[in-house]
Amino acid sequence: MAINESARHELFNHFKELLGTKDTGTLMELLPPVGWADVATKHDLAALEERIDLRFSGLEERSDMRFSSLEERIDSRCDILEHRLMSAFRGELNSAIHSQTKVFVMTLMGTLLAYSGGISALVLTR
């Protein structure tokens, strides 16, 4: 039998005759506003908790996989960028050392030629 407002009202009137208005009001407040089939039990709540836990576990696994994939891509791109920067730095450094060495060798050769000329002039004039 489905519980509707009409049935609840009849029950209220019946108990009002037996118990009085105050006690009947207390009794009716203890009943659920809908049928007992609509009331959740501890078992229902445990089953709901289990389903929610499974959903969150799946969500956590998918999130971990996505973040791992993202982390790998970022690490890969950072490695590529690091290699590019190091290559550019090495090229610039090699170029700077090469031109500095060229200037140093030319200066040293000029100095040696000047000293050789000066020594030769001293030796020949004596």
Image: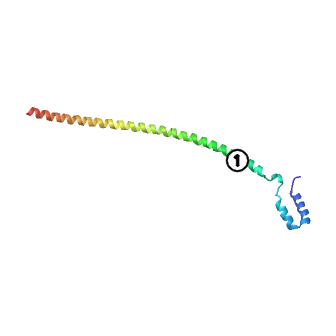
Q: Is residue 100 above or below residue 51?
A: above
Q: Is residue 101 above or below residue 23?
A: above
- Would you call the spot at circle 1 few (<14 residues within 10 Å), some (14-19), or many (20 or more)? few
Q: Residue at x 64, y 44 (%)?
A: 60
Total numbered labels: 1
Q: Name the image quarter holding residue 114.
A: top left
Query: Which of 86/17 is in front?
Result: 17
Q: Residue pushed farthest left?
A: 126
Relative image position of residue 82 (x, y in whole percent): 46, 39
Q: Is residue 81 left or right of residue 108?
A: right
**Which residue is tagged 1?**
52
Relative image position of residue 9 (x, y in whole percent): 88, 61
Relative image position of residue 5 (x, y in whole percent): 86, 58
Q: Residue at x 51, y 40 (%)?
A: 75
Query: Which of 56/80 is in front?
Result: 56
Q: Residue at x 86, y 56 (%)?
A: 4
Q: Quadrant of the C terminus?
A: top left
Q: How is the image coloured?
A: rainbow
Q: Residue at x 74, y 49 (%)?
A: 46
Relative image position of residue 83 (x, y in whole percent): 45, 37
Q: Amino acid at mark 1?
A: Ile
Q: Is residue 4 left or right of residue 85?
A: right
Q: Name the image quarter holding residue 36.
A: bottom right
Q: Name the image quarter holding residue 3.
A: bottom right
Helix or strand or loop: what does disc 1 sit on? helix
